[in-house]
Image (tube, rainbow, N blue to C red):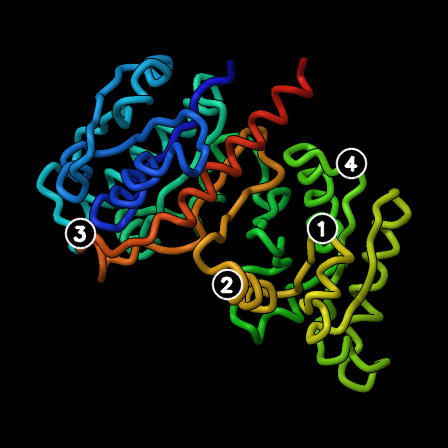
């Protein structure tokens, strides 16, 4: 039996507590693996009326999970209110994340699912990382440059090569080495977490029509194609560069397991158009399994019983599947 998953509540003022509770309610229909929540108990009880069983260690979750949501409590910000983020809720979210990462590193949790946090609130308390991914990578002793952010849904998997930077800076940040690093990490990640032994990777062009043979830009010839050739030389099944407007059609998607996209919106717009309620963020290249729902804190609907748990359910399922596959390979 593999260890349970650790699922953080994220910012206590956001929708994290509600969607984690709703995910537990859907555990049978969604066929979810055993998991336990990590976070502030008061915040969870304010927005969810289901049964909660506080635990002192992850191992206790196995016996509690059938009848109650196991919760490893973090006793901060008991006065927090849904929809009202504060510095205290941000500190609680950060403390929760640090605790949960440690549990996954120790193996007492088989993987980590992170609830949504507010980057602005975290930065206000001195958080210097761009997001949770970079924080987790640092805790695991991995350079953030060797970690790839994969966004996945039932119909599509994408990895943006450049992420949270202005569109105008993409051409100057984009390099062949960066594409190779992301491509290598994605291929190994698909093998390690999904059992896809020979992943098929499609690479998008940067410019319209993939540059139209240099008429609309030369980044495809200067940067993208050399990276593809390097990846092919390493034995990976890679095609491209493909015109971005043709990459995500139903027929095209049948030809690859993952698409490498040159910038944030190039990959996330089609992903959210196809899988808005089931989008999952999975960090590839980490020694631990980490997923998260592909949405934010939604402070505007927190506490109103309006939050859709679909992406959280999908994130828990994906983490559980990856943990099960890794455990089978270790036997």
**Left or right of residue 209: residue 67:** left
Residue 97 picture location, percent across and down: 36, 35
The local crowd at label 2, few if under 14, some if 14 to 19, many if 20 or more residues have their Cα within 10 Å, is: some
Give the residue number, with chain letter if any, for mark 2: 272
Query: Element at badge 1?
Result: loop
The local crowd at label 3, few if under 14, some if 14 to 19, many if 20 or more residues have their Cα within 10 Å, is: many
Q: Is residue 242 above or below residue 146?
A: below
Residue at 31% x, 45% y is 19
Task: Please report whichever mark, 1 or 3, sits nearer to the chain's N-terminal start.
Answer: 1
Query: Element at badge 4?
Result: loop
Where does the C terminus fall, quadrant-wise?
A: top right
The local crowd at label 1, few if under 14, some if 14 to 19, many if 20 or more residues have their Cα within 10 Å, is: some
Residue at 13% x, 41% y is 46
Task: Please report whichever mark, 4 or 1, sits nearer to the chain's N-terminal start.
Answer: 4
- Judged from this view, the residue extending furthest toward the front is 29
- Judged from this view, the residue extending furthest toward the bottom is 215
Please give the label number shown on residue 257.
1
Task: Please report whichever mark, 2 or 3, sits nearer to the chain's N-terminal start.
Answer: 2
Q: Is residue 38 visible?
A: yes
Give the residue number, with chain letter if any, for mark 3: 303
Please give the label number shown on residue 197.
4
């Amino acid at each position: 039996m593999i260890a349970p998953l650790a699922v953080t509540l994220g910012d206590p003022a956001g929708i994290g507590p509600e969607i984690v509770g709703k995910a537990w309610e859907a555990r049978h229909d969604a066929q979810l693996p055993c998991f336990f929540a990590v976070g502030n108990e008061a915040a969870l009880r304010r927005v969810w009326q289901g049964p909660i069983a506080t635990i002192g260690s992850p191992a206790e979750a196995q016996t509690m999970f059938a009848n109650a949501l196991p919760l490893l409590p973090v006793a901060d910000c008991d006065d927090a209110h849904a929809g009202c983020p504060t510095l205290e809720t941000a500190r609680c979210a950060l403390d929760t994340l640090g605790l949960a990462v440690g549990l996954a590193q120790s193996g007492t949790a088989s993987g980590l699912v992170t609830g949504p946090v507010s980057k602005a609130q975290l930065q206000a308390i001195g958080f210097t990382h761009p997001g949770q991914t970079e924080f987790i990578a640092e805790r695991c002793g991995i350079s953030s440059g060797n970690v790839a952010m994969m966004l996945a849904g039932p119909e599509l998997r994408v990895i943006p090569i450049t992420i949270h930077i202005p569109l105008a800076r993409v051409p100057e940040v984009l390099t062949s080495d960066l594409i190779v690093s992301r491509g290598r990490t994605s291929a190994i990640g698909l093998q390690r977490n999904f059992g896809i032994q020979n992943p098929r990777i499609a690479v998008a062009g940067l410019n319209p029509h993939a540059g139209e043979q240099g008429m609309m830009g030369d980044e495809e010839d200067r940067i993208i194609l050399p990276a593809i050739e390097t990846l092919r030389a390493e034995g990976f099944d890679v095609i491209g560069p493909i015109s971005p407007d043709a990459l995500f059609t139903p027929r095209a998607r049948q030809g690859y397991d993952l698409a490498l996209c040159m910038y944030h919106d190039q990959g996330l717009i089609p992903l959210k158009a196809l899988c808005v309620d089931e989008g999952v963020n999975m960090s590839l290249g980490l020694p631990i399994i980490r997923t998260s729902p592909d949405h934010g804190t939604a402070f505007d609907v927190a506490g109103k019983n309006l939050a859709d748990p679909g992406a959280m359910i999908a994130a828990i399922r994906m983490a559980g599947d990856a943990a099960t596959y890794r455990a089978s390979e270790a036997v």
